[in-house]
Amino acid sequence: MNIWQDLIKGTVVPIVLAMLKDRPMYGYEIVRVVNARTNGRFEWREGTLYPALHRLEADGLVTSKWQDGASGPGAGRPRKYYSITGKGLAELAHRTAEWKEFSAAVNACLIGG
């Protein structure tokens, strides 16, 4: 049993919403930022991200728009940028509150509280 994989699966949605909170991003950019912020512990790949993005879009939590890439490798190539919606911001706030409560309970059990 890989505990990291189980924990990661349960956090994909709130992490994606959090990544989109400040600005629109394209899929591979989200993967790179998450991997960097977690010092490679999550090792997200497109197969982790895109099904979640499609569900979030179907649920009205994010929208997408094709745009030309601004800079870097593949500049000018169309990329699908994702943006969080008002409904997505509300869901992020809800999930963040749940996470704080959950992690406090786990910490109380594991390290005392």
Image: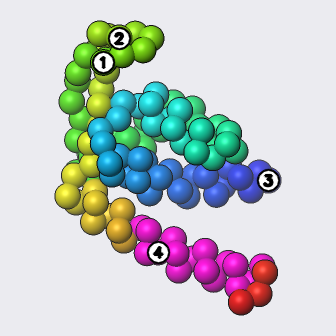
Q: Secondary structure at mark 3?
A: loop
Q: Residues within 10 Å of mark 2 (few under 14, many from 20)?
A: few
Magenta segment's dominant SS is helix
Q: Residue at x 58, y 45 (%)?
A: 37
Q: What residue is rendered at 67% in x and 42% in y?
A: 39
Residue in the image at 68% along x and 39% along y: 40
The reply to whether discs 1 and 2 touch (Cβ–Cβ < 8 Å) is yes
Numbered tag placed on residue 1 in the rendering: 3
Amino acid identity at mark 2: Ala
**Residue at mark 2 to residue at mark 4: CA–CA distance:** 39 Å
Residue 63 visible within the image: yes
Q: Which mark is residue 75?
A: 2
Mark drawn on residue 81: none
Q: Relative to 78, is 14 on the left or the right?
A: right
Residue neighbourhood size for the residue with mark 4, other residues' Cα within 10 Å, grouped as few (<14), some (14–19), many (≥20): few
- Sequence-wise, the earlier of marks 2 and 3 is 3
Q: CA gap, disc 1 to disc 3?
A: 41 Å
Marks 2, 3: nearer the viewer:
2
> Mark 4 or 3 closer to N-term?
3
Q: Quadrant of the C terminus?
A: bottom right
Q: Is residue 103 magenta?
A: yes
At label 4, the amino acid type is: Glu
- Indicate the amino acid at tag 1: Ala
Find residue 55 and report its horizontal and vertical position in percent: 35, 46
Q: Position of residue 79 (x, y in %)?
A: 31, 21
